[in-house]
Amino acid sequence: MRTDYAFIGVTLVVACALIGVVPILNYLIAPQTPNKSKRETYECGMETVGDTWVQFRAQYYLFALIFVLFDVGGVLLFPFAVAYNSVNLWGVIVVSLFVLTLLASLGYAIKKGALNWE
């Protein structure tokens, strides 16, 4: 029992040490050659003219979030599809609830008009 906590403690100490050591090593090892071109904002190789603040419609963000939702859902369903023959009834029920949740969220997004382009 004590060795489990010791492993967690050692891992925590090493992680904290790395968080402190890596930036210091980066500062010491990285070449320090500042110049004007390194301090400019990189925008596809072209210098921006005028105001660089561009407002996007919230619909783009909603569309991206819905994409991520179903992309992650597909990734989570892949192991179930691979091991379908060896899954017991409880696994089928859990995956069915997951798919129903995804379908309900898709229905909600359609109802709210999040997928309509104007």
Image (spheres, rainbow, N blue to C red):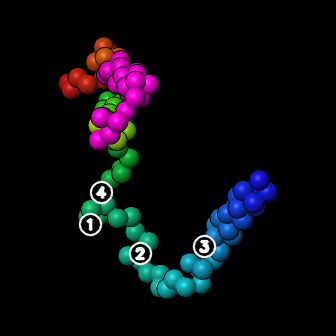
Mark 3 and mark 2: span between their CA atoms? 20 Å
- The residue where tag 2 is placed is 38
What crowding class fits label 1: few (fewer than 14 Cα within 10 Å), some (14-19), or many (20 or more)? few
- Residue 45 image position (x, y, % from top left): 26, 66
Mark 4 and mark 3: span between their CA atoms? 35 Å
Looking at the rendered structure, the secondary structure element under dot 2 is helix
Q: Can you tell which quarter of the image residue 101 is in?
A: top left
Vertical relation: 6 (above or below) 103: below
What crowding class fits label 4: few (fewer than 14 Cα within 10 Å), some (14-19), or many (20 or more)? few
- The residue where tag 4 is placed is 49
Residue at the image position 32 percent from the left and 21 percent from the top = 103
- Is residue 94 highlighted in magenta? yes
- Residue 4 image position (x, y, % from top left): 72, 56
Report the predominant secondary structure element of the magenta stretch: helix
The reply, left or right, for residue 103 in relation to residue 91 is: left
Mark 4 and mark 1: span between their CA atoms? 13 Å
Residue at the image position 30 percent from the left and 35 percent from the top = 84
- Residue 15 image position (x, y, % from top left): 65, 64
Mark 1 and mark 2: span between their CA atoms? 12 Å
Residue nearest the observer in this picture, 77 or 39 = 77
- The residue where tag 1 is placed is 45
- Is residue 95 highlighted in magenta? yes
Looking at the rendered structure, the secondary structure element under dot 4 is loop
Q: Which residues are magenta?
A: 82-106
Identity of the amino acid at label 3?
Pro
Identity of the amino acid at label 2?
Lys
Residue 23 - label: 3
The answer to which of marks 1 and 2 sits earlier in the sequence is 2
